[in-house]
Image (cartoon, helix red, strand yellow):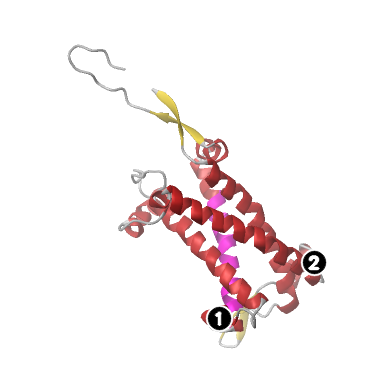
Amino acid sequence: MKQIKEKHSLAMRWCHWVNFPMLSIMIWSGMLIYWADDEYSITLFGHTYFKFFPEGFYKYFNITHRLSEGMAFHFLFMWFFILNGVFYVLYTLISGEWRELFPKKHSFRDAWQVLLHDLHIRKMAPPQNKYNAAQRIAYTAIIIMGIGSVISGLAIYKPVQCYYLTWLCGGYHSARIIHFVLTIGYVFFFVVHVVQVFLAGWKNFSSVVTGFEVAETRPIKKTNGEKES
């Protein structure tokens, strides 16, 4: 028997779909700002193996000489990003959905089983409720990353006024590194998340849009000669 049941609340779906374009704008505008001082690279023993980012990358995406535009977009949309994040965290705490979201005692162990299943090494899917162990870790990590981005971003934006945040990050340059690494982490999360959506199929994707899913239910066995439902 099939029945329609609610899977994702309106508040969760709102925050999810608002956060995606918000974060995309923040990453894009951040790239326009980073172009003005692109000092980071992968260097070992005096040899640079990769520079963030090659000149061809900047030209292809038309990033060069747009510093003021990037700062305007970045400093405007960061407030919408913060408000959306604060609302989501408060909602999960007040509604009690944090119980379904935060990692459990054995989540890190079980996440390995989820990975093996996704790689088609393990045939049987690990048991899960609303979210599996890997999703719990990933979604909690993205919240922590968001908090880290806000703290390090404010430390870069106002290092004197927010000197306590700058100190917390280990100084201005450390705050900038943290902010940059977190941005790379968001891009990596996006790629993995999109791949997982395709692997999960339309049913899982549609539930994030509508909030409902069609679930299979087993018939209830009745006694005393009653018919099964």
- 152 above or below 15? below
**Is residue 29 in view from this perspective?**
no
- Taking the image as shown, residue 56 lies to the left or right of residue 144, namely right
Q: Which residues are magenta?
A: 174-194
x then y, percent, for residue 217 = 36, 27
Q: Is residue 75 magenta?
A: no
Are dots 2 and 1 in contact, CB under 8 Å?
A: no
Q: Main secondary structure of the magenta part?
A: helix
Front residue of 30/165: it is: 165
Q: How dense is the environment of label 1, judged by Cα within 10 Å: few (below 14), some, or many (20 and up)? A: some
> Regarding mark 1 in the picture, which secondary structure is present there?
helix
Q: Amino acid at mark 2?
A: Glu
x then y, percent, for residue 37 = 72, 79
Question: Which quadrant holds residue 151?
Answer: bottom right
CA distance for labels 2 and 1 = 28 Å
Q: Amino acid at mark 1?
A: Tyr
- 130 above or below 42? above
x then y, percent, for residue 55 = 75, 72
Q: Residue at 23%, 12% (x, y): give it.
A: 226
Q: Residue at 61%, 78% (x, y): give it.
A: 162
Q: Which mark is residue 70?
A: none
Residue denoted by label 1: 164
Report the quarter where the C terminus lies. Answer: top left
Residue denoted by label 2: 69
x then y, percent, for residue 99 = 38, 51
